[in-house]
Image: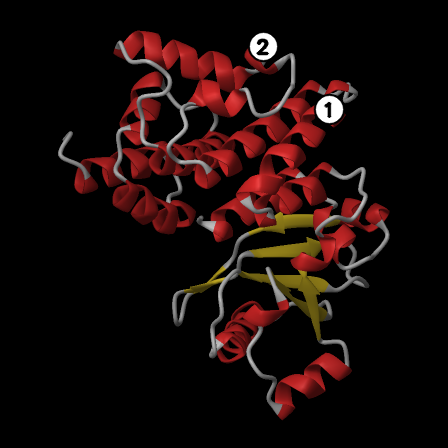
Amino acid sequence: MKTDILFYQLFQSFHSLLFELIERPIAEAESYEFSSVEVKEKAFRFDGIFSPTDKNKPIYLIEVQFQAKPDFYWEYLSEIFLYLNQYRPEQEWKAIAIFGKRSYEPELRSHVEEMISCQRIQRVYLEDFIGRETKSFGIGIIQLILASESQAVAIARQLGEKLEREVDPDIQEQVVEFIETVLVYKFPKLNRQEIEAMFTYSDLKQTRVYQEAREEGEQRGLKLGEQKGLAKGQATMLLRMLNRKFGQLTTRLRGRINKLSVKQLESLAEAVFDLETIADLTNWLQSNTKDK
């Protein structure tokens, strides 16, 4: 699963999620803007940055790690200090290292321990949130990401039941999209109807994501379940990100992205932060697909 893209979307959609994870008051989220920033000298990119509107609050530099990586801290510290040299922010900074499991964190060197001791680096272990009672949709989706296949169905249904009580239609739609995306990755052999049957959210068919998918299927003469599960999940995430960045994409552009292979989708996921206009996206598709 492309967790960097997924967590970018989670932090963007649920603005208070970081503050829940680091156990800070949720109200602090109102003073921050979330973004992804590239450190150009080495082409490093943080998984996310929360920049405060108040100069007295710290910048949070986020990195999410879902596999064991021995050189994680070497690369993370390189990103941090290159960022500080390039942008020279007035505010203080804190690094938030988010590990899916404790076992993914490499052995600590003395210089890293010193930065942890002085609270420059704060570590979060998402496995600590498994089974925790929560009212947060963001935490619930993280629990779904970490769940085994046997646990995922029950967690998806619990989220669906919470959605029945949610009055904000935008939140309902966002959560449904995240649930579908995660389940597509966990159960790539199932089609959309089978995935929908896993969680009992009665208003699913009224959401924009469902209606658009149906319309696209009708226009292209395809059934909703025909796309491969993995590519479909990646396409869903990328379309959500591109829609937020550029506004609603045309049916033709959405169709072209939905036709991309897994490898092409992964390439687009890497390039998406550097695309500044719809023309850039169109040019990328022309350069990287046969449909020119």
Callout 2 amino acid? Gln
Circle 1 is placed at which residue position?
161
Q: Left or right of 42: which side holds 267?
A: left
| CA neighbours of label 2 inside 10 A, class few (<14), some (14 to 19), many (20+) | few
Q: Left or right of 111: which side holds 252?
A: left
The mark lying in front, picked from 1 and 2, is 1
Callout 1 amino acid? Glu
Quadrant of residue 221 within the rendered picture: top left
Quadrant of residue 220 within the rendered picture: top left
Q: Left or right of 188: which side holds 30?
A: right
Which residue is at a point 34% across and 13% down the rendered structure image? 217
Q: Nearer the viewer, residue 288 or 32?
A: 288
* Residue 70 visible from this viewpoint: yes
In the picture, the quarter occupied by the C terminus is: top left
Label annotation for residue 206: 2
Q: Nearer the viewer, residue 258 or 184?
A: 184
Position of residue 191 relative to residue 277, above or below, is above
Label annotation for residue 138: none
